[in-house]
Amino acid sequence: MSFDTRVTQRPLRVAPTPRIRPEYKRRMRLADTLQVLCFVSVAVSIALFLGDGGAARFSTPADAITSLGVLTGLVGTDLLLVMMLLAARLPAIDRAFGHDSAMALHQSLGKPALYLILAHVVLLITGYSLAGKVTIFAEAWSMITQLPDMLLALAGLGLLILVVVTSLVIVRHRLPYEVWHIVHLLSYAAVLAALPHQLTSGSLLIAGSAQWYYWLALYTGVAGSILVFRFILPVVRSLRARLVVEGVDEVGDGVVSIRLSGRRLRRLKASSGQFFIWRFWTPGLWWQAHPFSLSAAPTGNSLRITVRALGDASAALPGLRRGTRVSFEGPYGLFTDRARTSPRLVLVAAGIGVAPIRSLLETATFLPGHATVILRAHTAEDSYLADELAALCQARGAELRIIAGKRPAGLNTWLPAKAVSARVSLKTLVPQLRESDVYICGPRRWTDEVVRDARSAGLPTRQIHFERFDW
Ligand SMILES: Cc1cc2nc3c(=O)[nH]c(=O)nc-3n(C[C@H](O)[C@H](O)[C@H](O)COP(=O)(O)OP(=O)(O)OC[C@H]3O[C@@H](n4cnc5c(N)ncnc54)[C@H](O)[C@@H]3O)c2cc1C
């Protein structure tokens, strides 16, 4: 049997010249602005120290070490606040980077921020002990027992270490998601616990000074954004949408599509390909929320997701009753037609990754003959939503290719063994790849391989889009 099944035929057309869409340029401008703001916030925290005459406090080793301690504390705290903003679900950040990239950046800042805060503690104790000619232990003890709010700050540091350690890949994968998530939420308490000692110890943040106003504004801005965008807005939107389960349809072994109905859903401005974080208000499920992508284009009164049972929550979803209330956060993600930069479209899916690909296909803009859908499966029969994809491809003039077969053992490839021996690649499957945006969704390693194939075909980053189903 051939590994490649061409389900629909591609009409021949001449491709128009690729044109970068204005939305892409706007997004890049927004991303650049946000990055500059991030650097500016770090520069301002250094300027706070310099504005307080910090440059003159490097004359003795004790002063120099203490000054470095203050600087690392300021920059470390600033990075922690930037990390919190990245995870605060701010619409501008989601629009500029996409939720997964923002979370990846958030994750990558965790260790540097912790190291800076640890350096802050060590340097200050060392600097003060040198100045006071006492041992490091005596200095540490007197700081904890005599300086106001220091115990609280220490508790904050303990929480921060716990959060970073539980986020290390090796530890995180051993913990249930919900446990990791609750521990992670403690980072809010950690950052808040550090604030009183910043305001009451040292000479930098004196009440009423410009530095004091700036620091409080920074803290208030971040806390307000988290409160509004992570907590208040999702509750308000969920109450307004009045979303309920309309029906559950079996799609395949352990896979169901869940139809949801609500009111005035256009106000959510959701797009095909985006995901929400859903909470189903039923015993056993109400206490956990899970991200699932839209598997059909959203309408004014309906949404649909398609879920594969991978754990306890997803396995319980087929049992949802009609009328179950549903609350949500979102929509999130840049895996949409708005991220397009080229006239042609290539959609590549494997496994349950077909869900956002299916909804994208429904509404993406392309001329008949200018889109190719590549569905990767073990056998031509075991892919999800394949019938719906075939019908949509037929209706919209897209080509559907089902690439079936097992991956060769020991080789890093997204293709089956037969395709590898036949030297198949994205470029051979889609001759007009260079004029296309490629959207990829599937298991992490498989996705990495498709991305690698697209890059080696010369596709620039702006034309490659992928959604990861794990953060
Ligand atoms: C952006 C995004 C879109 C997704 N879209 C779909 C989809 O359309 N269809 C689909 O079937 N699956 C989708 N997933 C995967 C889905 O969220 C997980 O399979 C589901 O959360 C597993 O929960 P569980 O309790 O059943 O399994 P568990 O055994 O608790 O977890 C299985 C895996 O899912 C991860 N996970 C669990 N809960 C969460 C959570 N709240 N947030 C992030 N990761 C979590 C765990 O870390 C673990 O790796 C998506 C994931 C992401 C991040």
Image: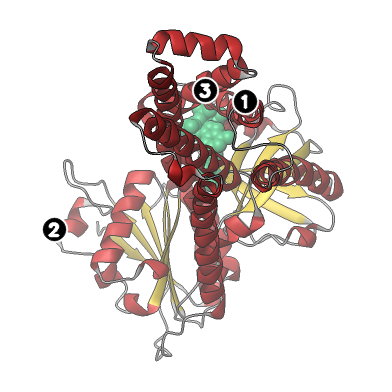
Along the line of sight, which residue is nearer the eye, 355 or 210? 210
Pick whichever, 108 or 117, lies toward us.
117
Tell me the element at label 2: helix
Please name whichever residue, 180 or 403, is drawn nearer the observer in this view of the structure.
180
Look at mark 2 in the image and give the residue it sits on: 421
**Which amino acid type is marked by label 3?**
Leu
Crowding at dot 3, Cα within 10 Å, few <14 / some 14-19 / many 20+, comes out as: many
Task: Report which quarter residue 319 is drawn in.
Answer: top right
Q: Position of residue 5 (x, y in %)?
A: 33, 63
- Secondary element under disc 3, as helix, strand or loop, is helix
Nearer to me, 394 or 58: 58
**Residue 442: percent from the left, percent from the top?**
41, 49
How far apart, in angstroms, are the residues tagged by discs 2 and 1?
64 Å
Residue holding disc 1:
197
Q: CA distance from mark 1 to mark 3?
A: 12 Å
Marks 2 and 1 close (CB-CB < 8 Å): no
